Image (cartoon, rainbow, N blue to C red):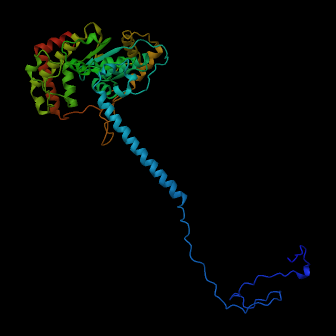
Amino acid sequence: MHKKIDPHPSPSVVHTQTPPPPPPSCASPNTTQSRLTIPISPPLPCVPRLSPLPVAMPRRRPIRAFETLRHAMSSLQHTCIGLFTLMLLLLALLQFSNRFDTSICDTAHAQEHPLLCGTSRRVCRDFPAPEAPPPLVVIAAGGSRAGSTWLFNALRILLRVRDPNTVAGWHADLSAWHDRYAVRPPNATGEPTARAFQRMGTSLLVKVHLLQDWHHFQATEDADAKMEQHVDAVFTSYRDVRHVVRSVRDMGWGVDVPLGRLTHPDFCRKRAPQQRHKTLTAGQYHDKSVWVRQALATIRCREVLLAAAGGKLKMDIKAEDMRGLSEAATVAVLRDMGTHLDYAYSEGELEGAARELMRLRAPLCNAGAVAMDLNPVTHLHRGHVQVDKSPAAGLVERRGMGAITADADCALWLTRHGYVP
């Protein structure tokens, strides 16, 4: 017979078994026994606690600042490589563009092709300006030491009243300004310098001594080109040639002119090849023929200049008449000059111009070790420099000036201009 099992046993007969306690540790030898009264096996021997085995730690990540710097250096490297490549492409494009026809690089379309024509994107616009009289090209001409500087300043002041934008100066200075500031289109050809100044829309005053100065300013050596074809008015001055030669001697500017050169058809019209005249010394002025040749050269150059001026010659002023003028007399002279400048000057404007003209003075002689030899605006030189202050100098002058008076050609010129009876 099978034994019947009670599904609900009594609690008094239930037997529980408690798991054995862990072995005592060496760190706690006084471990209390379990509360259970069940006997246990004898205690296990003390086993020392072993340290855990070393475990490989994860690799630390680099500091974030170094990562940023590394990325920045990498980006910079790629950028430099890209710019270098672009530069090579541009150079190749410029070389390739030379094969194209550059006729499009004219004044009308050059701005549309800056890479091909080498132009900028700047656009020049003309803004409305107050109404002004038409610009003029005026020449102040006269031999050296013959009142040409007074004439130049009188015209400079009058033209500035007429047009405050007027450009005035010595022909060589104006040529230098033209070379420095002129803007030339790619296909531009040579043209007279005065035309570039005229395109500014302002008046131009050019001071010259000889016709060859005008040709040099115009950047042309055409001896047949007449001044009257390119200018609006020519004003000249003259002086007793005897005193011209003496004044040039006092300034130390005298140069000997060979007699054969005086009769050359191009004399005073254009520069002689490799023209390098040496300045005359005080001893050379003891030769009376030197005085005569310089006087003849002055007369000859003046005749050539007047012939080139033609119908554009407005006034021929005697330098002696301009010396020591009162304010009223200066106003009268300026009034006559103003009638040829296409402008109605008021009496107040003429009086102001006369006062300004009378206040001009030459630069100081004792200005220091380094000083300007002339005023670049008025073209007045430092004081007259005497070659010799001894009594012999007066004797040399009297002999030289007497030789000029005795020469037939010089005497004829002096008589025509009222210097000798």
- Say if 144 sits above or below 339 in the image: below
Q: Is residue 125 left or right of residue 97?
A: right
Q: Toward which corner of the image does residue 179 lie, by quadrant? A: top left
Q: Is residue 247 visible?
A: yes
Q: Nearer the viewer, residue 106 or 130?
A: 106
**The N terminus is located in which quarter?**
bottom right
Residue situated furthest front in the rendering: 1
Q: Is residue 77 left or right of residue 384?
A: right
The residue that appears at 17% across and 29% down in the rendered structure is 394
Q: Is residue 323 visible?
A: no
- Say if 9 sits above or below 360 in the image: below
Q: Position of residue 13 (x, y in %)?
A: 89, 82
Residue situated furthest left in the rendering: 260
Q: Position of residue 203 (x, y in %)?
A: 38, 17
Q: Position of residue 74 (x, y in %)?
A: 45, 50
Residue situated furthest top in the rendering: 311
Q: Nearer the viewer, residue 54 or 388?
A: 54
